Image (tube, rainbow, N blue to C red):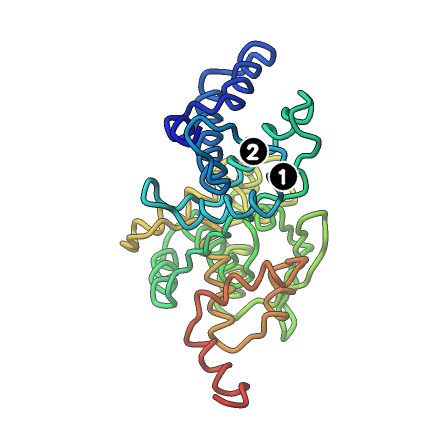
Amino acid sequence: MAADVARGECREVDWYLSDLSVAKGASPNTLSNYARDLNRYAQFIAETQKAEVGASLDWGQVDSGQVESFLVSLGLGTENHGPLAASSIGRCLSAVKSFHKWLVREGITSENPAAALKSPKRSMPLPKALSVQDVGKLLDVVAEPGDVVALRDSALLEFLYASGARVSEAIRVTADDMDIEDEFAVVRLFGKGRKQRLVPLGDHAVRAMSAYATRARPALAAKGTGVPELFLNLRGRALSRQSAWEIIDRAARRANIQTAVSPHTLRHSFATHLLEGGASIREVQELLGHSSVSTTQIYTKLSPALLSEVYRSTHPRA
């Protein structure tokens, strides 16, 4: 049977795939994916059981440890295939779970050894942050003297980088949410679930916001119907997410920045630069409006110099 499995001819897998095709009406693409994953699984079990040619695989003897070992092998890769991504391993596990569930339903086995196993977590992609120098180039481009649109664009980019706001938060900000007259300027942001937080603003952002509010916004607002949002488009309406993206993309091209830049790039840069400047994870968590500090910790992966310094100053044997 081991030789049969190597050719992708496991009897139980064939029965299961036939049932998927006839009874469940699975698509050819689904059948192809399941066949590839399950025949790979059957090959692994055959090798584990040291099945002889012509012997039958004993699916009732498969335990959760063997299934876990199979998943680990997928992540490590073999001579026949390279290591799989977490998403692909999760797909294989889904197929294995369904197959064992079918074996139980058909009375071939009594238990599903894969039932309690969970798919591996997909690795969280690292945020792409700009260097301090590139952020400076981006903000300098929009700070050039110009019309009401230039003043708005400068205020928007300075605001995004100064506050770390999500683009959805920035376009909802109103004049009532701003307090830039006192010594310590702050803005009130409404995050996910309408959760509020106060974020300080630096001098550069305050100057750009003041110039926009007094010299540009009234002219834009006159073309609309009096919406409360601070950032407006040329028709006097609230700026959309898409328009904000376009403003930043246009500025990045003018600044000759080679990497893709989006509103979230400025948010990532805000967090990374704070950490590099010595801010703590907890402090950055509050400023970003993250409910969990683990979400904020992804930014530390972009700051090896900071981590090295923390290590040197805190580890007893550093």
Tell me the crowding category of disc 1: few under 14, some 14 to 19, or many 20 or more residues within 10 angstroms, Cα based: many
x then y, percent, for residue 25: 56, 12
Tell me the crowding category of disc 2: few under 14, some 14 to 19, or many 20 or more residues within 10 angstroms, Cα based: many
Residue 236's tag is: none
Which residue is depicted at the point 47% across and 73% down?
276
x then y, percent, for residue 105: 69, 23
Q: Which residue is mark 1?
A: 114
Which residue is depicted at the point 62% across and 50% down?
173
Q: Which residue is mark 2?
A: 96
Drawn side of residue 224 relative to residue 10, left or right: right
Say which of 71 and 91 sits in front. Answer: 71
Q: How many marks?
A: 2
Quadrant in the picture for residue 214: bottom right
**What is the CA distance from the residue labelled 2 to the residue labelled 1?**
7 Å
- Find out whether the residues at labels 2 and 1 contact each other: C-beta distance under 8 Å: yes
Q: Is residue 255 above or below residue 236?
A: below
Q: Secondary structure at mark 1?
A: loop
- What type is the residue that disc 1 sits on? Ala
Say which of 43 and 78 sits in front. Answer: 43
Quadrant in the picture for residue 176: bottom right
x then y, percent, for residue 129: 42, 59
- What type is the residue that disc 2 sits on? Val
Q: Secondary structure at mark 2?
A: helix
Say which of 195 and 224 sits in front. Answer: 195
Q: Is residue 298 above or below residue 23?
A: below
For the N terminus, the image quarter is top left
Q: Is residue 232 above or below residue 21?
A: below
Label 2 vs 1, first from the N-terminus: 2
Which residue is depicted at the point 56% across and 33% down?
96
Drawn side of residue 296 relative to residue 253, left or right: right
